[in-house]
């Protein structure tokens, strides 16, 4: 059974940093691309970042480019999201999502989702 | 404003069929044969319902179906049930390699 367990969320002041983790199990982690998707309170889904199975290719939404960095450690079956220079508008529930293939470019959908970790940016 | 436009809400009675549309409003939403749909119940994670416009993952009821005409994809739910009441999101990809979601549609079962 595929399981994705996010952690690392919390309350942080504007301008601060936070690192989210997503621990995966139930599948061969290194064989699949992964993404982070967020949802602000009461709002819709917003794709944040994606990474290929090897970690060699990464993509970012314009809203986070230059501030967030996605990475993965295939030996630990974990994908990370390093978030710097946080803003109030980054407040959201952050979901980790699995893609159905190794190459991010050819991964046209998200087949499994975690339960999310809440990030609140406030002074 | 999202590159994918959905109606804010739709409603239907039990047993009826409803359709949720998803229209690409940006020319960089590429290869619009790769639309996927997600169901999200309150307080829950999204769940994949349809991928690549018409494909249904194993375990998803055959009451859910997808289609496309021009730059508009659609999700149809037939034989509406109370448990179908949820938010529904369409998604596609952009030529830049990024991904995009529609604004979401709240389905109310009357």
Image (cartoon, helix red, strand yellow):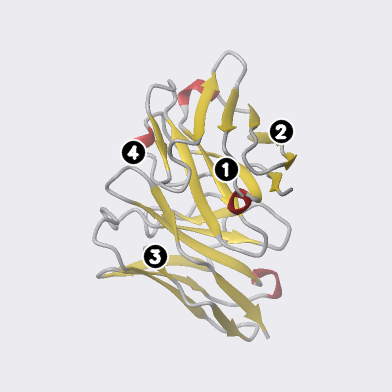
Report the disc number at residue A106: 4
Q: How many residues crowd mark 4 within 10 Å: few (<14), some (14–19), many (20+)?
A: some
Are the numbered discs 2 and 3 placed on the same chain, yes or no? no
Q: Residue at x 72, y 34 (%)?
A: A7
- Say whether disc 2 or disc 1 marks the residue closer to the N-terminus: 2
Residue sitting at the far top: A75
Is residue A114 toward the left or the right of residue A11 in the image? left
The mark lying in front, picked from 3 and 4, is 3
Q: Which residue is mark 2?
A: A8
Q: Which residue is mark 3?
A: B4
In this rendered view, identify the residue nearer to me: B45 or A91.
A91
User: Is disc 3 surrounded by few (<14), some (14 to 19) or many (20+) residues within 10 Å?
Assistant: many
Read off the residue under disc 1: A112
Residue drawn where x is 57% and y is 27% of the image: A79
What residue do we see at 66% from left, 75% from top? B81
Residue found 38% across the figure and 34% down from its top: A104
Residue A26 shown left or right of residue A54 in the figure: right
């Amino acid at each position: 059974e595929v399981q994705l367990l996010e952690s690392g969320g919390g309350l942080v002041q504007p301008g601060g940093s936070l690192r989210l983790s997503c621990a995966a199990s139930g599948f061969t982690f290194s064989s699949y691309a992964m993404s982070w998707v967020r949802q602000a309170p009461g709002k819709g889904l917003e794709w944040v970042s994606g990474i290929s199975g090897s970690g060699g290719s990464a993509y970012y939404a314009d809203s986070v480019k230059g501030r967030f960095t996605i990475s993965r450690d295939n030996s630990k079956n974990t994908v990370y999201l390093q978030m710097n220079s946080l803003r109030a508008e980054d407040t959201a529930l952050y979901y980790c999502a699995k893609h159905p293939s190794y190459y991010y470019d050819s991964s046209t959908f998200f087949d499994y989702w975690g339960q999310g970790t809440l990030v609140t940016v406030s002074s | 404003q999202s590159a994918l436009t959905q109606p804010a809400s739709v409603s239907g009675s039990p047993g009826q069929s409803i359709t949720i549309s998803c229209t690409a409003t940006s020319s960089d939403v590429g290869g619009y044969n790769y639309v996927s749909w997600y169901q999200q119940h309150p307080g829950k994670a999204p769940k994949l319902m349809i991928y690549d416009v018409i494909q249904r993952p194993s375990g998803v009821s055959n009451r859910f179906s997808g289609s496309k005409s021009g730059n508009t994809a659609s999700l149809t739910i037939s034989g509406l049930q109370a448990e179908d009441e949820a938010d529904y999101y369409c998604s596609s990809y952009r030529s830049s390699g990024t991904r995009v979601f529609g604004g979401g549609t709240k389905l109310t079962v009357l």
